[in-house]
Image (cartoon, rainbow, N blue to C red):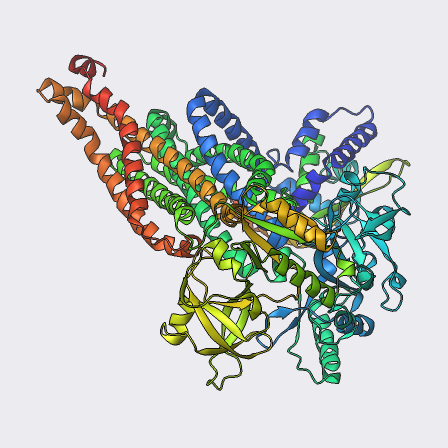
Amino acid sequence: MRFFRRLRYWLQASRHQEDLSEELEFHRAMLNDAPSMGNTTRAREDARAVWIWPWLESVGQDVRYALRNLRAHPGFAGVAILALGCAIGLNTSLFTVFNAIAIRPWPVADAGRVVNIFALDDHFRRSGFSLEEFRYLGAHSKTLSGALAMRDEQSFRLEDGKALASWVSGGYFSTLGIGMQRGRGFRADEDTVDAPQPVVVVSYGFWQNHLGADPNTVGKQLRIEDTPFTVVGITGSGFSGTSAHVVDLYLPISAAPILQPRAAWMKDFLHSPDYCCTKMAGRLAPGVTRAQAEAELAVLHQQFRGQFHQEAHGIRLTGTAYLTTGKSDKILPVFAIMLLAVMLVLVLACANVGNLLLARAAARHREISVRLSLGASRGRVVRQLLTESMVLACAAGALGAAAAWWLPALVFRYAVTETLSFRMVPDTVVLAYALALSVATCVIFGLAPSFHATRVGGLARRFSLRSILLTAQVALSVMLLVGAGLMTRAVQRARMQDPGFTISGISIAQFDLPANSYDAPRTRAFFSQLSSDLSGQPVALTRLAPLGGGQNWTNIRLPGDIEKEGKLVGVQEVNRGYFDVLQIPLVKGRTLEDADGDRPVVLVNEALARRFFNGDALGKSVVAGKPYVPREIVGVVKDAYTSSLDEITLTLYFPISGDSIPMALYRATPGTADAIAAVARNIDARTVTTFRPLSDNLDKYLQGSRAGAAIAEALGGFALALATIGMFGVFAYCVQQRTKEIGIRVALGARPAQVIRLVLGSSSRAVLIGLLLGFAGAAGLSQLMRGLLYGLSPHDPLSYAMVALALASAGLVATFLPARRAANIDPVNALRCE
Amino acid sequence: MGTDKSSELLPGTLDLLVLQTIARGRMHGYGIAQHLKMLSEDVLQVGESSLYPALQRLLLNGYVEAEWGISENNRRARYYSLTAAGKKQLSTERKEFDRMVLAIQKVLA
């Protein structure tokens, strides 16, 4: 209670002081000419002092003393602040990223009341709704004050370039309360299936970068896929979207048929009650809790599905942070590993600075003894020393928080190819985290040394704490270095290994056609024309380029099996040229032929043949694909890492059909690209053909890991530097402490080699133990990294050997100067200096 | 974090006297001083430099509360009154004081 009264007093300090002054003035006036009883100023000061925390003043004193002390030792302060600052900066940066994708909700008004709404499927996984059901839920729910639907973003052609568009329902802008720069969001009547409206809202960024911030944009026309859309609004600059991607345009969901009138799925999408998966979100009505809304929506969900005799498995409401949308199982493990790494760095930095503080405490032994013998309590001296640590930690925390402003954005620019909409900037949550971290580090690295320093006598004990800290430093840096070594080797190996198909010299051609004029028959016609025109040349047609980041899957079972559904295997739709161009050899049987188009035949890779037929697959049948019918295996090809470098995917190769526009792979020789583009233009003059080398896919595929390896290397290098400083400190200190002893030994005839052995002996055991502990820890923890190593063993001996070598060289560097000084000690000087 | 004690009277007694004074009704600082002086027949002359720190201490401990009002001569003055916690504290301190005085008398007798 007193605490809060004090706090309230200081929060309104000036008002309280005015009160006091006026009160004293009144008192004075009443006294009139009666003799004054004391000094008014003193009365005011004393009265005010009642409210000061008694310990606060001496803390101020301690801080001033600590600052003076650190300024007197800039080298020590610099190393300590830099080491801790980097470590805190790394932690805070990671947390900034985590905050942006896992904690921070959508950038909308009163975001805490906005929820993502998921239907649960029969495995209780989160999924979306049909558009029809969304409308039903939105219309009948009383616990939601507004509902909105979104479909995955789609890229569309503009007159110049492309734009990413998000399909949203009419309630999107009003429900979320998105501030507009100009114009307005959609009205409900602009999103009706019966009367779709060609209207568009552009994002602030698109308006700035693409429309030149034209103040008269609203009301103008924007041609999307050659269809004019009217711009009705521009989103405010503070709205970065509700998806991970940077969205340029917002279109009403009902306008989909305007852009893709011939798409086969359109009718189902707009009307079918079971056409999955539109994302749904809503704003809770005032006073309604999540649980209440969840219960009500579950009932409505049941009612809706019941009308169509479908099962309902419940509704789940979540917040709107990015990770709640179900990507967490892929991202969180990576975060866990990185968190572990930066935490190790932090502990390492703490051990390092703790050791530096110990050395300083030893140098201040006399000062501390004097203070203790003059009557300072041990607690008081510990507090003084802790204050010094706190000052260091706060400076480091400020440095770390500053790093968090630019480091995450920098790393993301390097590591991620596409621009993401997350704002990687610290907010109060992040700053609170940095502060908490600073205080925690201060306690970790400051407490033990302070208690040690105030223990009178007992130098021997101090040595053992030094050794423990040294061992910890070495062990931690070894673990980080092993992690870095494994990542580096894994990426290198993935780059070097034979993927089982040709990458270099192969290019990808992609055909872009106006989406709104291609329906199924037209697409098929384009495909067969393209296929026959290119049949003379070695050109591969496929749906998916190798390592393109996608993979189609199909159920497969053997004709005799009674199971309804079988095992999931990868499926590739290709023509015969695919195997020629990528040089994937045929092992048995025949390859695909152009005439195979509609025949129920497939090729399989060796892995699939082994898994299902003990390697003898030729002539057998599998049930797979659409339609789900038996298909004869006419050939077996060699395994190739086309979908992932980690492992061979069991793969079925279907003859490619004309259901959609394929892409082409070809050996890049002069003129081929032009010839392919010309063929496509001959079929439809509007075709835009783009080319890129297949090696782009490999680079993109490895980019995340390569960035991961670079981060790991940076952490490892930092750890090695800290360990080197740590070792140097301990050895140098050891030589300084034992100067006299060494002098006597030299005077008694010890040779330099013996002296050096003496100096190194005690501490090198700590280093060795640290190395072994580090290896043991790394062997355990690296199991967690298995998924990131492209099949490299977490116990890869070469990585461990490299680490041992790196540490040995660091040790050599760290001991060189102290050892030379020890060897050069002049006995006469050494003995005289006391 | 002990409460500061006044040094002019018997330790702690100023707080007790102030509490006792305003227990009869709300009163401003000057009034409290006058009241003490009058009742003690000029023996207890409490100056600003001990009275106002004492009042602030009582505020801090939550024994009294203060509000602005108009004085008998039509000036703005700050009036203090006892809180529930203050009443309790007054009776505890009184008992403690009586016990102390009794003890001292026994020694001096």
Q: Nearer the viewer, residue A157 or A585?
A: A585
Task: Tell me which residue sits at (71%, 66%) in the image.
Answer: A278
Q: Nearer the viewer, residue A238 or A617?
A: A617
Task: Tell me which residue sits at (57%, 78%) in the image.
Answer: A628
Which residue is outermost to the left?
A749
Residue A562: horizontal and vertical position, in percent? 49, 87
Task: Tell me which residue sits at (43%, 77%) in the image.
Answer: A619
Task: Tell me which residue sits at (70%, 33%) in the image.
Answer: B46
**Hey, which quadrant is residue A725 in on the image?**
top left
Report whether residue A556 is seen: yes
Report whether residue A421 is seen: no
Q: Is residue A277 above or below residue A814?
A: below
Q: Is residue A378 left or right of residue A94?
A: left
**Hey, which quadrant is residue B67 in on the image?**
top right
**Hey, which quadrant is residue A311 in on the image?**
bottom right
Q: Quadrant of the C terminus of chain A?
A: top left
Number of on-image labels: 0
Residue A441: horizontal and vertical position, in percent? 46, 41
Residue A80: horizontal and vertical position, in percent? 44, 31
Residue B64: horizontal and vertical position, in percent? 72, 47
